[in-house]
Image: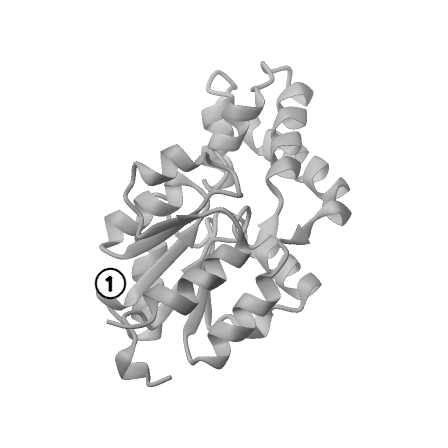
Amino acid sequence: MNAKMRKFELIVFDWDGTLMDSAATIVHAIQSASRDLGQPVPDDATARHVIGLGLEEALRHVAPNLPTTDYPKMAERYRHHYFTRNHELFLFEGVRELLDELEAQGFTLAVATGKSRAGLDHALDHFGLRPRFRALRTADQCLSKPHPQMLFELMEALGTTPERTLMVGDTTHDLQMAQNAGTASVGVSYGAHPEVALRALKPLACVDSVAELRQWFQKTNVRL
């Protein structure tokens, strides 16, 4: 396909809840870390809402009364519980095929995630996906979503503009980041946040599966 006919050239993916099915593991780790520090245990909805934020910001949301000096300890407990269930994590069905198709068509792919760089590197190497992405930005490299720094840096590094950039994510933090950066977005409702919350931020589309996301790319978004 002729690249000049494409509306977008850079596609930025969130990781957790968009490419990897990790929302339940993150919720468990947040709840267990809260319990370990003697904090009220957030319900599932509250814990899911902070998915996509940087870890420190997420923990401050779910445990606002914790002494500031204890957040590093809570983060350590979160990581402990997360990695004890690391073997349960897997890519959503169809993710590899989607990335293969987009790369074959000449799109530039990147990741913007609330994970740490070490956590993202571990996941990319585990699934063998590092070669798929031209650039990566994480919450310990940039300001946390929904601040647009991740997208601004990716666009600068990869030589493109907001009009030619698309953000794909499963949380309102992803879609708000896209709005703040002036880029278009697509919401995926199979991750952390409910469809109604995603649609309220007016993405180009809101899809229910990776298969539907692939169909959307094939039919609607690649031409002006």
Q: Does 25 sit left or right of 48 as displayed?
A: right
Q: In which quarter of the view is residue 117 placed?
A: bottom right
When asked about the image quadrant of residue 168, the answer is bottom left
* Identity, as a three-letter code, of the amino acid under mark 1: Pro
How is colour applied across the structure in the image? Answer: one colour
Name of the residue lying farthest toward the bottom: 2
Q: Which residue is mark 1?
A: 162
Which residue occupies the foreground of this view, 71 or 130? 130
Q: Residue at x 47, y 53 (%)?
A: 14
Q: Nearer the viewer, residue 31 or 5?
A: 5
User: Measured from the top left, where is residue 173 in percent x and y?
Assistant: 38, 41
- Foreground residue, 208 or 83? 208
As drawn, is 159 to the left or to the right of 137?
left
Quarter of the rendering containing residue 125: bottom right
* Most foreground residue, 197 or 31: 197
Residue 210, image x, y percentages: 53, 56
Residue shown at 42% from the left, 80% from the top:
106
- Where does the image place residue 62, in percent across and percent down from the top left? 50, 24
Q: Residue at x 38, y 33 (%)?
A: 196
Question: Would you place residue 196 above or below residue 221 in this image?
Answer: above
For the question of whether residue 178 can be seen, the reply is yes
Image quarter in which the N terminus is found: bottom left
Q: Secondary structure at mark 1?
A: helix
Residue at the image point whose x is 61% and y is 30% from the top: 30
Residue 207: x and y, percent? Answer: 44, 49
The tally of labels here is 1
Please rate how many residues cluster around mark 1, counting C-alpha atoms within 10 Å: few if below 14, some from 14 to 19, many from 20: some
Q: Above or below — where is 164 with respect to 139? A: below
Q: Quadrant of the C terminus?
A: bottom left
Residue 144 visible in the picture: no
